[in-house]
Image (cartoon, grey):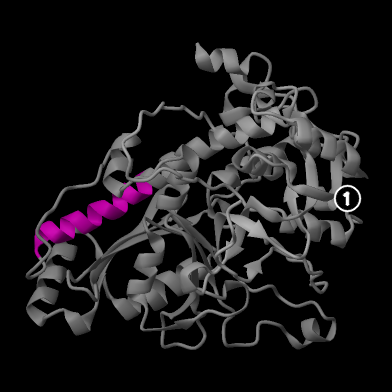
Amino acid sequence: MKPATDHLPIALRAYADAPKARALRRGIGASSWTLTFDCETTTDAGQALRFGAYQLRNGERLVEAGLFYDPAGMPAAQVMGLRAFAKREGLFIRTRDEFVDEVLFRRAYQLRARIVGFNLPFDLSRLAIAHGPARGAMYGGFTFTLSDQKIWPHVRVKHLSRRCALIDFAAPFRQRNSRGQRNRNMPTPVRRGYFVDVNTLSASLFSQGFTLGSLSRFLAVSNPKLELDQFDGPVTDAMLTYAVRDVQTTWECYAALLEKLDRLGMADLRPEEIYSEASIGKGNLREMGVVPWRISQPDFAPTMLGTILSSYYGGRSEVRIRREIRQVMLCDFLSMYPTVCTLMRLWPFIIASGMTWRDTTAETQNFLASVTIDDLQSPDIWPKLTVLVRVQPDHDIFPVRAAYDGDEQATIGANYLKSPTPLWFTLADCIASKLLTGKPPRIVEAMAFEPGPVQPGLRPIDVNGNPQYRVDPVNDDLFRGGAGFLDRVLS
């Protein structure tokens, strides 16, 4: 038996009851106004703002188009060139401060416009005159000061991934509520704004990354992105033409993405609330009438929530043979997570009015002792894996969160594990450990989960807005698709 060579404290997920907070109001939504803008910067490491272009629209009608620039970084001769170009092209010309105060805040913010850009967090940061750490719900992100006028709020940005960030307006430094509202305890909600990053929206709808150029070609918009290699030196008409086209291209891509979103048939799904493919998936669930589990079963025991959370380790990949030439077989995993969900028959849990559980310690001990890798080739085995197991680890291989190599951040690794305290894992993790070590882990306790009755009021939807891919949540498995779905895909 391989001895333990490292003794590390391990980290576990946990659940804590949060204090009851005031119910959040979603708001009435964005108006018909849209502000689309793009910044051009210096080519050094600082990437400071040089100039930018914008379009203000009401619906599809272009109300105002213009250029803005940073006077501190723009020589007088180039400002004259900027103004001459703007006059020739019928564009407004503003300083950075004028654009921020008069267009972004006094018009877009006040009119509840959607603020649109490609890689929008970067462009917002180029407008900033100061920055600091964000607080509250945006802790871990940045707060940007865009205006010297205290009546206007800061903008907060918190990156969630390479393609996705939360963006909103902070509360302004002024009294939002009248004396009557304060006396009646009827506060005016903070106007958080409506920010749409076209980069995030396109990746969410098409499950692939784009540049603005590749997206404009993919969507075949009328005015695709121009190519320009020279950004050093004085501002030229070519640079200005390039910037103005970028804004038009961004707008056309945004409009095309809205058409795609409309075809999905999810009227409740707002573009500023889409952060990834998961947002689209949740929108489908709402259209089906599926009530979230924590709402359908609000009295679910907190201790059981803690048990479930502590056993969750997410997806991981492991390479056990390194720097050796070996014969390999290419395996094509087609949507591995949905495949596993279908094999385990997890869809009934999603549409259920809660779930139940029962002790299956003896049953699970016998199953784990006898299961083989050949058994796992049978689809009949997988529905039996909806079990959480409390084990006494004794040199078993399990996923473990720990600060490896002195790192401050705990990460997940598959390790030989020995612990004086029993720990919760999934039955699938226990099977994997048995197959890797040749011995089943020692089970202290096991619980099998079963879905409750089907929720009322569920309704069919057309996936991706296509009636050929109609899914009835009561009779079909969304992870697999509706009747004949797989046959149509393979054909």
Question: Above or below — where is 107 with respect to 491?
Answer: below
| Residue occupying the point 90% across, 40% down | 362
**Magenta span includes 442:** no
Q: What amino acid type is highlighted by mark number 1?
A: Gln
Residue 234 place in picture, x, y as percent: 7, 70
Residue furthest to the front: 1
Question: Above or below — where is 175 with respect to 278?
Answer: below
Asked where in the image residue 16 lies, by quadrant, the reply is bottom right
Residue 366 place in picture, x, y as percent: 84, 35
Q: Predominant secondary structure in magenta?
A: helix
Residue 115 place in picture, x, y as percent: 45, 61
The answer to whether residue 100 is visible is: yes
The answer to whether residue 267 is visible is: no
Q: Secondary structure at mark 1?
A: loop
On screen, residue 259 versus residue 360, left or right, reads left
| Residue occupying the point 35% across, 66% down | 123
Question: Above or below — where is 482 with respect to 341?
Answer: above
Residue 229 place in picture, x, y as percent: 11, 55
On screen, residue 231 versus residue 486, left or right, reads left
The 10 Å Cα crowd at callout 1, few under 14, some 14 to 19, many 20 or more, is some
**Magenta span includes 250:** yes
How many numbered marks are there?
1
Residue nearest the viewer, comparing 54 with 5: 5
Q: Which residue is mark 1?
A: 297
Asked where in the image residue 14 lies, by quadrant, the reply is bottom right
| Residue occupying the point 79% across, 71% down | 18
Range drawn in magenta:
236-252
On screen, residue 404 versus residue 379, left or right, reads left
Residue nearest the viewer, comparing 15 with 294: 15
| Residue occupying the point 46% across, 27% down | 332
